[in-house]
Amino acid sequence: MASEVKSSGVGFFGLLGIVFIVLKLTSVITWSWWWVTAPLWGPCALVLSILAVIALGAALVCGLGAMFVWFVERTSRTKR
């Protein structure tokens, strides 16, 4: 039988977010709320940023490929 691994509970970033919120509410740290909640939204923002860079890179490569094809077709027509 294959054993199933089930994960429950708060992950690392969730725990870090809870610790930062408690420290902020008890005035131990005076950070902005943006930094206090960063462990909660930071990983999602990082993934979205990486996907945006990949999408822009793919668009750039496709655009350059299309320009290359256009240039080759144009130069082959002028040589005839």
Image: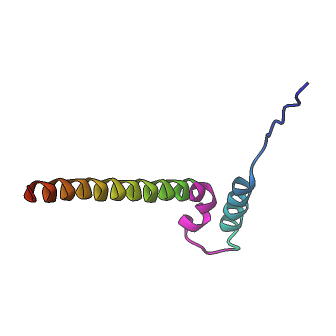
Chief secondary structure of the magenta portion: helix
Where residue 46 appears, as percent x and y from the top left, is: 54, 59
Q: Nearer the viewer, residue 15 or 12?
A: 12
Query: Is 59 placed above or below 9 here?
Result: below
Q: Nearer the viewer, residue 69 or 61?
A: 69
Q: Residue at x 14, y 59 (%)?
A: 75
Q: Nearer the viewer, residue 51 or 12?
A: 51
Q: How many marks?
A: 0
Q: Quadrant of the N terminus?
A: top right
Where residue 47 appears, as percent x and y from the top left, is: 54, 54
Q: Is residue 76 left or right of residue 56?
A: left
Q: Is residue 67 left or right of residue 31?
A: left
Q: Quadrant of the C terminus?
A: bottom left
Q: Residue at x 61, y 55 (%)?
A: 40
Q: Which residues are magenta?
A: 29-43
Q: Residue at x 53, y 65 (%)?
A: 34
The quadrant where residue 74 appears? bottom left
The quadrant where residue 63 appears? bottom left
Q: How is the image coloured?
A: rainbow
The quadrant where residue 17 appears? bottom right
In magenta segment, residue 41: yes
Where residue 21 appears, as percent x and y from the top left, is: 67, 61
Residue placed furthest toward the right:
1
Q: Residue at x 71, y 73 (%)?
A: 28
In magenta segment, residue 50: no
